[in-house]
Image: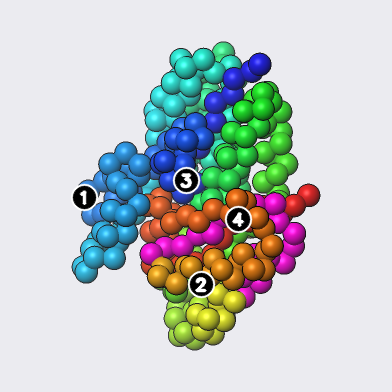
Amino acid sequence: MSHVAIVTDSASDLPPEVAKAAGIAVVPLVVSFGPDSFRPGVNLTTDEFWQRMTAPDAPFPTTAAAAPGDFLSAFRNAFDAGADSVVCVTVSGDLSGTLKSAQVARDQLPDREIHVIDSRSASMGHGMLAQIATELAAEGVSGAEIARVIEHRKEDLRIFLALDTLEYLKRGGRISGARAAIGTVLNVKPIITVEHGIVENAERVRSRPKAWERTLELLTQAPLERASILHTTNADIDTFMAGFMERSKLDPSRVQLMVVGPSVGPHLGPGCVGGVVLLRH
């Protein structure tokens, strides 16, 4: 039976304990607060990140791509542990240079079977794909076949997040200042999505309750196979989760609740709620 190792990056928002239990290696991006740089999951936890992020007068955090050397180490560790091949699922190549780093590392091991997949998604979008890859690997599916399935299934992902403000996306360079200003002036609550690998504004809604309601509608408008509900330090997540469970009709075992971590959190800010769903097919 083939032994396939699964690798992803910290923009997947897979909590370290979840990744470890699944046997998924997570390569960290870099998060910096002013002169202080951190590697999520290595020397910065999600709780520590949000404490820093929401502290008064804290410098705005910036993110940088994972390093090729860290991917190279992850790939070598996998082969040293007996893997026949590696499947690596990364954050969208249009959102981060992390994909390129993984490709650079792959090309340094030309005699090894390494499949690098651009998820065209982010957060638990590619986190979920990594989990699916691990499940297939446990069944003895080959690396090439896992890569084929993941390339196919990434088309079934949908991500919708209701933000309190577009300010953080603007500061992180993910949208223009003009687009952010429109949302601020109108006092709307933006709902964002990731389409074709880039962040798009799905809808603008006039209040937080309406934004949450519309986000639930968008997440549950088609039959689902599994889901991850996401939030950023939001006290009302239980209410949102209950609404999702009622609408989606999913078995609770098919739904995860995750806090957005340090690699994606700087672009969303506090008060965000939403989710990633995989359509049934």
CA distance for labels 1 and 4 = 42 Å
Does the CB distance between marks 2 and 1 fall below 8 Å?
no
SS category of the residue bearing label 2: helix
| Location of residue 140 with respect to 150 vertically, above or below | above
Q: Which mark is residue 239?
A: 2
Q: Is residue 277 visible?
A: yes
Q: CA distance from mark 4 to mark 2?
A: 15 Å
Task: Name the kind of residue labelled 1 in the image.
Answer: Pro
Q: Which residues are magenta?
A: 214-233
**Pointer 4 or 2: first along the chain:** 2
Q: CA distance from mark 3 to mark 2?
A: 22 Å
* Disc 3 element: loop
User: Is residue 6 within the magenta segment?
Assistant: no
Disc 4 versus disc 3: distance between alpha carbons? 18 Å
Which tag, 4 or 3, sits closer to the chain's start? Answer: 3
Q: Residue at the spot x=41%, y=24% of the render?
A: 73
Q: Is residue 88 above or below residue 219?
A: above
Residue 47 % position (x, y): 32, 54
Q: Which mark is residue 252?
A: 4
Say what amino acid the circle numbered 2 marks.
Answer: Thr
Q: Determine whether label 1 and label 4 are within 8 Å by CB.
A: no
**155 or 134, which is in the foreground?**
134
Q: Position of residue 195 (x, y in %)?
A: 63, 57
Provide the secondary structure element on which disc 4 rests: helix
